[in-house]
Image (cartoon, rainbow, N blue to C red):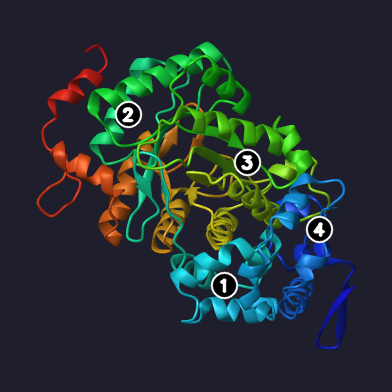
Amino acid sequence: MYAATIGAQRYTFADLKTLLAKATPLRSGDRLAGLAAESGEQRVAAQYALADLPLTTFLNEAVVPYESDEVTRLIVDSHDKAAFGPVAHLTVGAFRDWLLSDEATIDTLTRLSPGVTPEIAAAVSKISRLQDLMIVAAKCAVVTRFRDTVGLPGRLSVRLQPNHPTDDARGIAASILDGLLLGSGDAVIGINPATDSPDRAHALLCMLDEIRLKLDIPTQSCVLAHVTTTLDLIGKGSPVDLVFQSIAGTQAANKSFGVDLALLQEARAAALSLKRGSIGDNVMYFETGQGSALSADAHHGVDQQTLEARAYAVARAFQPMLVNSVVGFIGPEYLFDGKQITRAGLEDHFCGKLMGVPMGVDVCYTNHAEADQDDMDALLALLVSAGVNFVMGVPGADDIMLGYQSTSFHDALAMRDLYGRRPAPEFEVWLTRQGLMDKANRIRPGELPDRFRALLPGA
């Protein structure tokens, strides 16, 4: 049992998962699950109790039982005690102070990351201001490579997301052309297919590979089909670069996605066997989002932000190229408005980076949430200043296939200009070679390069 006193009132919390839930800044998903603090005073009391908790507590008490959950077993069995050693004597509050100090450098945080459990990362985030989350995340560098290098300090990459409601090749090609001309696509050119058809996924993979080869683009492609579909396509010789899968923070939630750790390991091994990467072998692409375990009734009474951090432990085990928190996609039942989406996006980025995960964020919302593009502009700017690895590039910021609002090619270009961020280095060289950068190294397309004309619909 954990306790704290506020004024004359003493608050008690039965176990660690209850303490973490009550300390969480308010969000609609936790209220829906009956886990949220009943008052602001109770939340503050939980945060006080959490701040005084020794970090070693998280190594001795699981929020989801070890015996019944393979994600918990992964977290416990893979914990790097040597990496954890330098901070093992600290409380959660003292750890937050240390992370904000000059002692916590890029190199120090890189060495520490294998020793940070998701519950520790989540606990620190719950007692941190947005400013704290940004400052610490900005000091973390997680670099990955396949055909280009993503995550270097001073860089901002973009997933070019050319989705189409009928997977029309001409519409997808037009979106890809639009994105490339505006400097998007260095994280990945990734299509969410409109159907579950393996034949359609194969056709899209071949189309992406043809475009990449024709234009000699130093990037990677991905069709975001289910991992089992991609595994079958690898077996049939499809040109698979990155293997995609949505993941969550409990075994039961992953089962609802039709996956387990063994399947993910099989998929990674299959992708590695293709040897398609030219400068690296980070072959996995994962997407996550606060509320996924709750929506599957697989949350075990744990708050949604802690479970989101546990999903990063799953991702970390497979050395991914990209991990993307699709922060506002699930809907207002889990993150009600722009304020909650903003907080969640910065929490996710902080927790993932602290754990050594290559984090991007899809700065997004659904049309029935209490949010608008002003909220997304603010969150995008905060994430870029905090060193996010990549964001989304969607034509007009409106995904007409998935039916949600995200960020556009122009939004990403604006952030690169505003913060002096550059694309991945190999992609930057390619942009210069295509005549898409001016003498000040800004992405400013002039005339349409001849080779690009082949991508025009009807060409």
Q: Are marks 3 and 1 in contact (CB under 8 Å)?
A: no
From this view, report whether residue 100 is shown above or below residue 111. Answer: below
Q: Which quadrant does the C terminus fall into?
A: top left
| Residue corresponding to mark 3 | 330
Give the mark toward the camera: 2 or 4: 4
**Is any part of residue 195 visible from this angle?**
no
Q: Which residue is the site of mark 2?
A: 176
Q: Earlier in the sequence, mark 3 or mark 4?
A: 4
Alpha-carbon span between mark 3 and mark 4:
23 Å
Percent from the top left, x then y, of residue 70?
77, 45
Of the image marks 3 and 1, the number of the one nearer the N terminus? 1
Secondary structure at badge 4 equals loop
Q: Position of residue 91 (x, y in %)?
A: 70, 79
Tell me the element at label 1: loop
Q: Amino acid at mark 4?
A: Val
- The residue positioned 50% from the left and 52% from the top of the image is 359
Under circle 3, the secondary element is: loop
Residue 63, disc:
4
| In the image: residue 291, left or right of residue 100 | right
Left or right: residue 353 versus residue 23 is left
- Tell me where residue 61 appears, x and y as whole percent: 83, 64
Q: Nearer the viewer, mark 2 or mark 3?
A: 2
